[in-house]
Image: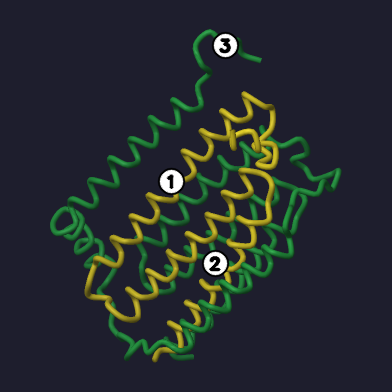
Amino acid sequence: MTFELVIVLAMAAALFGIGIYGALSQTNLVMIMMGVELILAAALLNLVAFWRYLHPETMAGQMFVLIVMTVMAVEMAVGFGIAVARFRARGSVEVEEARELRG
Amino acid sequence: MSGSAAETLFLVFFGAAAVWFGIVVFRTHSMVRSAIALLFAQTAVGAMFLVMQAEFLGVLQIMMMASEMSIMAIFMVMFMMDPGGLGAMEMTHQKRLSLKAGGAGFAFALGVILLGGWGPAAQEVPAAAAQTAALGRELLGRSMFVFESAGLTILTAMIAATMVAIAPQGEKEG
């Protein structure tokens, strides 16, 4: 077992925990997206650490990182699109004011 | 100081910085400060990539997050009633449950990390130029379908986001 790998994974676990807290506790759509970004950053750290310390000769690990970065960009684009539409309709991006979506 | 000790030291330093700025994101009342703290956290993650000798990904992470978080800060100022946090508005709910869920997620991940058998660590990493060349071959060879799917997904998301964001026809602005 490598000490460096455990350090990086532990830091990623901490970022993951903070991201979960942020995504669940915030009432603002943009702040929730920040929590999701932290969770995805933790996933990125894990992928790079696994590539570096377990399989540096296989480039599929780095390819996965590019895919997760794509997911981050897509999440931001769609999230901001929804935020703009919501702000235009209600003048706010507070998720607690979106109860009427329940129907 | 040996290379491995320096690597460990920098990983701990940048990891602690990423975690600290991650906490600051949700502790400050100012939304602009939150966006900047997230930028610093993501930059620290990019620096960890550089320490782990993934140069291309590290630079990509820092560049991408710098632009992404700048856009986020602009959106914050646009959408928030109190972007500067001067009124110290309460913008959280179910705090206790969230803390428990975050703590449980961290504890579970830490348990898996400490109990998992990771095997011996690789000592040698290909040089930066060799890595980039190998990644290019991977993207345009074995993983081409996945890579092209990612490009198509971004294109779809761009069109979808634009369509969602533009005002419906007939609706007056303002």
By what rule are the colours in the image chosen?
by chain
Q: How many marks?
A: 3
Q: Chain of mark 3?
A: B
Say what amino acid the circle numbered 2 marks.
Phe
State left or right for residue A94 relative to residue B112: right
Q: Which residue is mark 3?
A: B171
Say if mark 3 contacts mark 2, CB within 8 Å. no
Q: Identify the hue of chain A.
A: yellow
Figure quadrant of residue B55: bottom left
Q: Which residue is mark 1?
A: A73
Q: Earlier in the sequence, mark 2 or mark 1?
A: 2
Label 3: few (<14), some or many (≥20) within 10 Å?
Answer: few
Spatial separation of the CA atoms under disc 3 and disc 2: 41 Å
Image location of residue B60, percent across then percent down: 40, 55
Say what amino acid the circle numbered 3 marks.
Glu
Q: What label does residue A16 carry, if any? A: 2
Point out the residue furthest to the right here: B87
Q: Is residue B10 visible?
A: no
Q: Secondary structure at mark 2?
A: helix
Q: Identify the hue of chain B.
A: green
Query: Image point 29% across, 47% down: which residue?
Result: B150
Label 2: few (<14), some or many (≥20) within 10 Å?
Answer: many
Q: Chain of mark 2?
A: A
Q: Chain of mark 1?
A: A
Q: Evaluate whether label 3 is on the same chain as label 2.
A: no
Q: Residue A102 or B129: which is nearer the viewer? A: A102
Image location of residue B155, percent across then percent down: 33, 36
Q: Is residue B109 visible?
A: yes
Say if mark 2 contacts mark 1, CB within 8 Å. no
Q: Nearer the viewer, mark 3 or mark 1?
A: 3
Image location of residue B45, percent across then percent down: 50, 65
State left or right for residue B84 relative to residue B7: right
